[in-house]
Image (spheres, grey):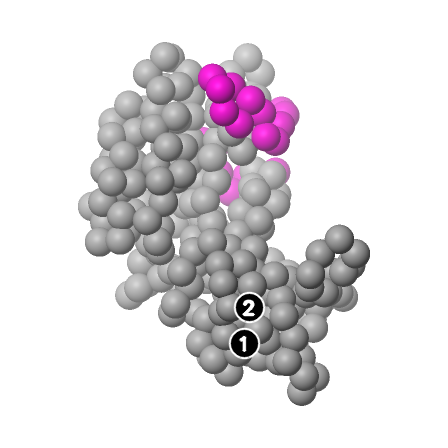
Amino acid sequence: MRHGFVKGAFLERVNRFLVKVEVAGRPREAFLPNSGRLRELLVRGRPALLRRCDPEGRKTSFDLWGIFTGDIWVCVDSRMANHLFPWAVSRGLIPALKDTMKIEAEVPYQGRRFDFLVSKGVERVWVETKSVTLVEDKRALFPDAPTLRGREHVLSLGKITEAGGKAAVVFMVLREDAEVFSPHWRMDRAFSQALVEAVAKGVMVIALRFRIGEGEVLGAEPIAVELR
């Protein structure tokens, strides 16, 4: 287990961003950096991995980072998607972005901020990343709750490619048991349709799966994308 992490057990979700956990036999509160439903993961009694945090300026001393399903660790910290994107690019895990010379984060364009701007010589690619934790029958699915914001991101990428630019959405599957990625049509048809339309406009859809350890990423590789 990496330094700065502690094991516990999940107890309950109090609200969107707050959970109760048990650490060293005591009930504690932890910040949940994920707005998804996570119903298949947040099961009472499951082993949890918590990151210790400086309590100054916040209500809790822990972030909930991972949940153990009984077979694998799943990272539930959605911030890891943006953290891992430059790492994945630097290791050549995204062939479409090979030979990248520069990666800028939170770059404003057309009235909104995009997660990344990737520069390859004179070529620029606008990128949005999405954290994925839901897997059913080896199929990673996004979103696990309706997401108007996610749909708006995809539509914005489509506008960039319509204007002659390049854009990509990268789905970061923070668990190792997925073999393919698909939009979650049953959960959010509007987002799924927007993604299909964005692809028709030239937006690249990329999916990576990550092997998660106790507070660390052990490896990653691209997986197939099936839009339907």
Q: Which residue is mark 1?
A: 10
Q: Secondary structure at mark 1?
A: strand
The location of residue 150, given as percent across then percent down, is 39, 39
What residue is drawn where x is 29% and y is 30%? 199
Q: Does 141 appear above or below 45? A: above
Q: Tell me which amino acid carries mark 1.
A: Phe
Circle 1 or circle 2, nearest the eye: 2
For the question of whether residue 99 can be seen, the reply is no
Q: Earlier in the sequence, mark 1 or mark 2?
A: 1
Contact check, label 1 and label 2, Cβ < 8 Å: yes
Crowding near the residue tagged with mark 1, few <14, some 14–19, many ≥20 C-alpha atoms within 10 Å: many
Looking at the rendering, the stretch of residues picked out in magenta corresponds to 90-113
Q: Is residue 118 left or right of residue 215?
A: left
Find out whether residue 50 is within the magenta segment. Answer: no
Q: Quadrant of residue 105?
A: top right
Residue 52 appearing in the image: yes
Please, is residue 179 above or below residue 98 in the view? below
Tally of numbered tags: 2
| Residue 109 inside the magenta-drawn segment | yes
